[in-house]
Amino acid sequence: MGRGRQKAKHTKIARELKAYSPDVNYSALERELGHPASEGDEYVDKWADQYADEDEDELEKA
């Protein structure tokens, strides 16, 4: 493919991407990313109890 055809293809793709606007459900995004005020301490990792740290496992074996 010559440089002219390559540039035309890139230009076509760039125009398509510029005009592309996906539908976004902002209320669902806000629920997913939002922090409810009644949750308590915001610095507590809610997944910490489900997975043990590898460092703790090595200390228990020693």
Image (cartoon, rainbow, N blue to C red):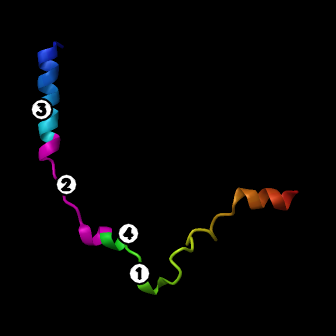
Q: Of callouts 3 and 4, which one flags the residue occurring earlier in the amino acid sequence?
A: 3
Which residue type carries mark 2?
Answer: Pro
The residue that appears at 74% across and 57% down in the rendered structure is: 55
The residues tagged by marks 1 and 3 sit, at their Cα atoms, a distance apart of 44 Å
Q: What x and y, as percent, mark residue 41? A: 53, 80
The residue that appears at 41% across and 81% down in the rendered structure is: 36
Q: In front: 23, or 43?
A: 43
On screen, residue 25 versus residue 34, left or right, reads: left
Q: Which residues are magenta?
A: 17-29
- Tag shown at residue 36: 1
Residue beneath disc 3: 12
Q: In front: 43, or 61?
A: 43
The residues tagged by marks 1 and 4 sit, at their Cα atoms, a distance apart of 10 Å
Q: Residues within 10 Å of mark 2 (few under 14, many from 20)?
A: few
The residue that appears at 11% across and 46% down in the rendered structure is: 19
Residue beneath disc 4: 33
Q: What x and y, as percent, mark residue 21? A: 16, 52
